[in-house]
Image (cartoon, helix red, strand yellow):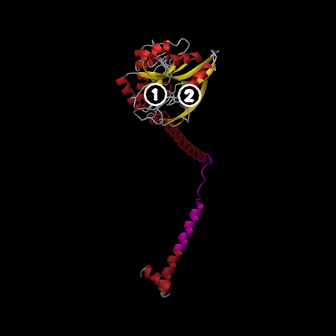
Amino acid sequence: MDFKTAMEHYRAGTASDTERRLVEEELEKSRLIAEYLDSQWEAAPIEEAPQVEMKKVRRSLWKRNALIVLTSLVLAAALLFGMVQYAIPAAEAKYWDPTAKSYPGYTNDLTLIMNAYSELFAPEQNIYSVNATRTGFASYSLSVAQWHTRDHGDISYLTASLNKSELSFPNGFWEFCSANIFERATYPFYFQDEEFVQNTRESLGQLPDYVQIRAAISFPEDLSMEELIAFHNSLEKGYVEWVGIRNSELDQQRYPLCGMKPFEGGVYYEHINEDYPYFDIKDREKTAENLETHFKSLLQYSQDQFAAGTGIKAGSYATDSYYQLSLDYIEEHGVYTYGCFVSGPAQLFLDLLDSGAASQVWIQDAWINA
């Protein structure tokens, strides 16, 4: 008989005597074997690892973890260094850097750009220097040192900003030339009535010799640069500060009014003259040709900067082609002026009105001449 059949009969209670003895003998064998194995397991307990070995294991694990942490820190530092040294500068390179210098010396490009802009459009505003402080990615805070004609050389500071090549000036930052300050600068022409002229004469006649006047004077007809120089030289006790230049046809008007400071010279750097002749006219011979070249260079420089995305739009109402259209007109018609800012004693302006050299005088400022 086989053990499997006998076991089934034993569990069912139908086993014969012979089958019962067979099963019980096998169960006894199994019990004895189990007891033997249990006794062998208890006799051979697992030995604890020596303390020295455990310390080695712990030390090895600590070194491995420390190496992982250190490697992670080094990789993170390398990644950060790469971003600071290469990735961020590379990304910023496509934006305008206001600290860039295209010409040797201390003057950065932004100072030149704002100098040209103030000379063209702000007769009494003079930019001395522009400093940029980085405030974020391709973002800068600008500190502009300027002196105003009415402040007689005292430096004041204005703030602006440059964010991803977008210049932003607060309201009133630029002091543009008033559109109607000259009789024949705008279309239609703006002539003052007799009462205004008479009041101006009376005001000038009441001022003593020690009072200095700054006024916008209008010419009866447009003057060439040669005629302007002759006019300037005729002012024994006065001088021309800013000259308005006609930049469009008589029956049109291209705003804002633009001009130059031909007899003063701004805070420029001479090396720029290599690219833009007589851009810096300070200490240069004041000939008609040189004055014309100076004004054209101001426009051309401003046009080039604006086209490159590093310039200033010519006033909020001007078209993007303002500089180029003005250049085209001047190349065809020449450089002529309809009026200028003059400083001198009150009697000088009365003489200009009496002689017919000036058709209108619009007083801008007055101060005691020390």
Cα separation, mark 2 vs mark 1, equals 21 Å
Helix, strand, or loop for circle 2?
helix
Image quadrant in which you'd find residue 252: top left
Tell me which label, 2 or 1, sits earlier in the chain.
1
Dots 2, 1 in contact, CB < 8 A: no
Residue bounds of the magenta highlight:
30-54
Q: Tag 2: residue type? A: Glu
- Say which residue appears at 60% left-offset and 28% top-offset: 157
**What is the quadrant of the C terminus in the image?**
top right
Residue at image location 54% in from the left, 70% down from the top: 34
Residue at 55 percent of width and 15 percent of height? 238
Q: Nearer the viewer, mark 2 or mark 1?
A: 2
The image quadrant where one finds the N terminus is: bottom left
How many badges with numbers are in the image? 2
Residue furthest left as drawn: 332
Q: Residues within 10 Å of mark 2 (few under 14, many from 20)?
A: few
In this view, 40 is above or below 177: below
The residue indicated by pointer 2 is 195
- Residue 190 included in the magenta stretch of the image: no
Where does residue 86 sit, x and y in percent of width and height? 46, 34
Residue beneath the point at 56% across and 46% down? 61
Q: Main secondary structure of the magenta part?
A: helix
Residue 274: quarter of image = top left
Residue 93 visible in image: yes
Q: Secondary structure at mark 1?
A: loop
Q: Is residue 38 magenta?
A: yes
Which label belongs to residue 185? 1
